[in-house]
Amino acid sequence: MLIPKKKKRTGTQIILDLTKSAAGKVQILGKQNLPLNIVYTICILIFSFSIIFGLYGWGSRLGDISKKEQSVRNLKMELASLEKQLEESQEFKLKLINDSLTIEAIARSYGMSKKGEKIFYFLD
């Protein structure tokens, strides 16, 4: 004996089946019989609202996305400043290698002098 395969139901079919059963219960329990279209609409709206704004819905993810976008902007700004600092350091390194006046200026700022030079300190 062959057992027929069950057809796979889509999400829409499942929702419609649930709303039909809920509509039947509403008609049985309620004093007024609501038209099925209104019941379907209400159920779909509640379901959609829970998906969009629920605890793990799309609405809760929007705040996370904006925080991450702000974090990316901050990291890009930090990267740009670090690249500028690296460029300045490389320029200074080239000056130290190629320019003797730069080396002398730095040495004098630390109180060093050439051989034979006299250093005078002025007291205020």
Image: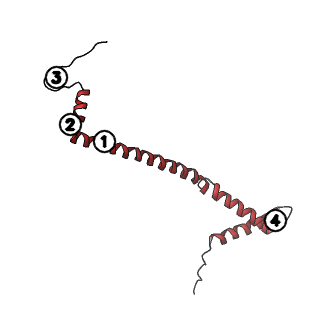
Helix, strand, or loop for circle 3?
A: loop
Foreground residue, 59 or 23?
A: 59
Measured along the vertical axis of the image, is residue 97 above or below residue 104? below
Real-space Cα separation, disc 1 to disc 2, in angstroms = 17 Å
Q: Amino acid at mark 2?
A: Ser
What residue is shown with label 4? 28
Measured along the vertical axis of the image, is residue 93 above or below residue 65? above
Q: Amino acid at mark 4?
A: Ile
What residue is shown with label 2? 100
1 or 2: tag closer to the N-terminus: 1
Residue 117 in sight here: yes
Real-space Cα separation, disc 4 to disc 2, in angstroms = 98 Å
Dot 4: few (<14), some (14–19), or many (≥20) neighbours within 10 Å? few
Q: Nearer the viewer, mark 1 or mark 2?
A: 2
Helix, strand, or loop for circle 2?
A: helix
User: For residue 1, which numbered disc appears in the image?
Assistant: none
Q: Are marks 4 and 1 in contact (CB under 8 Å)?
A: no
Side of 66 relative to 25 (left or right): left
Q: Amino acid at mark 1?
A: Ser
What residue is shown with label 3? 117
Q: Amino acid at mark 3?
A: Glu
What residue is shown with label 1? 89
